[in-house]
Amino acid sequence: MPSQVKGEGLKILSRRRSSSAGRKPPTKRFESLPPHLVLLCESSFLPLRDALTEVGRLYEEAKYYLSDLILAAGMCEDVLKRTAPRTQPKAKGKVVLGTVQGSVHGMGKNIVADLLRAEGYVVYDLGVDVPAERFVEKIRVTGAQVLGLSVGLIQALPSIGEVVEALKRAGLRDSVKIIVGGNAATLERVLELGCDAYAQSAVAGLKVIDKWMGNKVKTEQS
């Protein structure tokens, strides 16, 4: 994507940062706007997405701080909430997120949720301290293709295995990819527990999920 498009997205984020404080969300969506204005609103989605991708790159290069990533993701989500559903293209996929039972840290998970939504995914965030049965039920009801688990405490690692086993008993394990992140997670640990991938950061997790969904689309079209 040309740098000028990313620049437009960054300008949008900057304007949202300076103007959002103290403002109430509009009561009407864009359905009532004339077609040419609807088209203009829809055209803002791709620059926003590319701007957030640029923020993620700068974060990975240690040029931006975690607070910058959180701020950018939150502003993108705010814009999308105010303009949904007309500005967003077809969803890229469905993702269920949650912090496993025994762990109550949710900041990293929340960043992942914001990034995924800004990238066009439908996200079902179950919160923290989530039992295995809730993950299984949400995947069954939504048909989500990806399950993202967060674990902040080593003591809560067995809960990941419980989620995997519960999915197997429900006959859903083969239909969902599982990615795990959090302070207590490592690649070795999550693979031993039967998961598919480990994400060291929110940006890394987004890349893995994008790859999975891209591969899934190619398989379905072949």
Image (cartoon, rainbow, N blue to C red):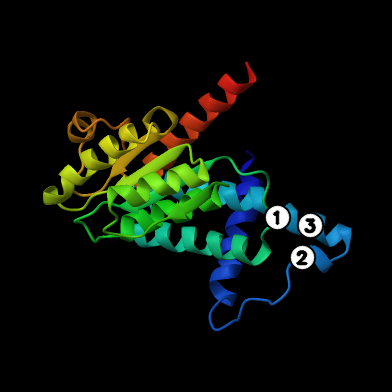
The answer to whether residue 52 shows anywhere in this view is no
Kind of element beneath mark 1 = loop
In space, the residues marked 1 and 3 are separated at their CA atoms by 9 Å
Residue in view at x 31 percent, y 34 percent: 169
Considering every residue shown, the one lying at the far top of the view is 222
Q: Amino acid at mark 3?
A: Leu
In space, the residues marked 2 and 3 are separated at their CA atoms by 11 Å
Considering every residue shown, the one lying at the far bottom of the view is 22
In space, the residues marked 2 and 1 are separated at their CA atoms by 9 Å
Residue in view at x 44 percent, y 30 percent: 175
Instruction: Rate crowding at label 1 as few (under 14), some (14 to 19) or many (20 or more) other CA atoms within 10 Å.
Output: many
Name the quarter where the C terminus is drawn: top right
The answer to whether 23 appears left or right of 161 in the picture is: right
Name the mark on residue 40.
3
Mark with earlier residue (2, 3): 2
Q: Residue 122 location, x and y as percent?
A: 54, 49
Q: Residue 69 location, x and y as percent?
A: 41, 56
Residue in view at x 38 percent, y 31 percent: 171
Q: Nearer the viewer, mark 1 or mark 3?
A: 1
- Circles 2 and 1: CB atoms closer than 8 Å: yes
Q: Amino acid at mark 1?
A: Thr
Q: Nearer the viewer, residue 97 or 175?
A: 175
Name the quarter where the N terminus is drawn: top right
Mark with earlier residue (2, 1): 2
The answer to whether 124 appears left or right of 27 in the picture is: left
Q: Quadrant of residue 34?
A: bottom right
Name the mark on residue 30.
2
